[in-house]
């Protein structure tokens, strides 16, 4: 049993944050729910839109910074340890390559100030801004997965894509390894076709611990732009006898700007 069952954690978070989707079942579709050709076509169109949105975000996302709170719980046997860190995450566009680079600087640990790079600071997931999204919704990785659109109970309910590995995953050398048994879910706002929740579960296998990761997205204003950015990342994993759950909350987004002061040769 995991340290903090994901369903319970998500339910508690959803109760305090109404905008965050509640957990959904990843059980396979029944025969009566098997997708028709029309649903398969709709799934392809929706994935096309999400791929386009991800590419546009990469192209237009400015360098930005946000506040983050990292809460971690770890157990080994009967011992349990909880911690909380706060700091700043920066997503900067490299001048040389134009690629986005994500960095974290923790400023407090269990409510005590810490110096930059202090090894006591809690570890936090990296690539929350593009990791899962790139895995499933990049043009290069799309052939590695199969996307199935679940029936929508009402027109106001989120669109739900069930994600699994493509039947030819094992024979595709360009697909990431170690994903056997993967199950994923993407929730999409039906009005805007924007991604609101993305998750993946990879079961334990071959000496590798099971792992769950998810990211929730919401609109944030950056300058004169409104972008859909992470507001919460969750992860849980088991490595040997150690079980760890981590939640990272993002807030206070704003565009990153650096001030440079040029001193003359005669300046003191």
Image (cartoon, rainbow, N blue to C red):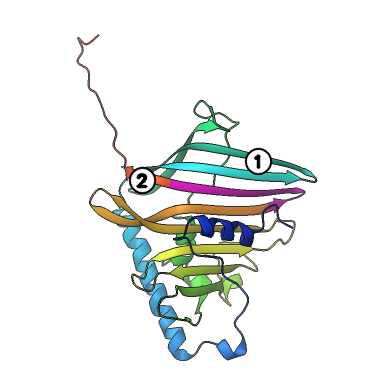
User: Circle 2 sits on which residue?
Assistant: 253
Q: Is residue 175 above or below residue 13?
A: below
Q: Name the residue under label 1.
A: 82
Front-lying residue, 83 or 205? 83
The residue closer to the viewer here, 6 or 43, is 6
Identify the residue at horizontal 51%, vertical 55% (top origin). Answer: 16
Q: Is mark 1 on a helix, strand or loop?
A: strand
Q: Distance between the residues labelled 2 and 1?
A: 27 Å
Return the x and y of residue 61 as percentages of the image width and height. Answer: 32, 52
**Residue 121: x, y in percent?**
57, 34
Name the image quarter holding residue 109: top right
> Does the segment drawn in magenta span residue 200?
no
Query: Which residue is situated farthest in the front direction here?
Result: 15
Of residues 138 and 242, the one nearer the viewer is 242
Say which residue appears at 51% left-offset and 53% top-offset: 233
Magenta span: chief secondary structure? strand
- The answer to whether marks 2 and 1 mark residues whose Cβ atoms lie closer than 8 Å is no
* Viewer-nearest residue: 122 or 25: 25
The residues colored magenta run 238-250
Using the image, determine if residue 39 lies above or below residue 55.
Answer: below
In the picture, the quarter occupied by the N terminus is bottom right
Whether 240 is among the magenta residues is yes
């Amino acid at each position: 049993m995991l340290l903090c069952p994901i369903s319970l954690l998500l339910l508690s978070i959803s109760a305090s944050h109404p905008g965050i989707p509640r957990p959904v079942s990843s059980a396979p579709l029944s025969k009566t729910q098997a997708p028709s050709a029309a649903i398969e076509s709709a799934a392809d169109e929706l994935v096309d839109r999400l791929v386009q949105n991800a590419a546009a975000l990469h192209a237009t996302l400015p360098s930005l910074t946000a506040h983050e709170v990292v809460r971690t719980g770890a157990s080994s046997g009967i011992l349990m340890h909880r911690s909380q860190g706060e700091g700043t995450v920066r997503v900067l566009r490299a001048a040389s390559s134009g690629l986005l680079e994500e960095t974290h600087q923790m400023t407090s640990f269990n409510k005590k100030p810490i110096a930059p790079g202090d090894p006591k600071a809690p570890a936090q997931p990296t690539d929350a801004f593009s990791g899962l999204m790139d895995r499933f919704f990049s043009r290069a990785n799309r052939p590695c997965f199969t996307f199935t659109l679940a029936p929508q109970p009402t027109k106001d309910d989120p669109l739900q894509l069930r994600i699994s590995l493509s039947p030819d995953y094992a024979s595709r050398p360009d697909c990431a390894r170690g994903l056997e048994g993967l199950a994923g879910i993407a929730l999409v706002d039906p009005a805007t076709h924007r991604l609101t929740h993305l998750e993946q579960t990879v079961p334990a296998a071959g000496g590798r611990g099971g792992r769950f990761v998810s990211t929730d997205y919401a609109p944030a204003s950056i300058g004169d732009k409104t972008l859909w950015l992470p507001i919460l990342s969750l992860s849980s994993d088991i490595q040997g006898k150690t079980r760890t759950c981590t939640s990272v909350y993002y807030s206070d987004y704003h565009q990153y700007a650096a001030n440079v002061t040029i001193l003359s040769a005669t300046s003191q």
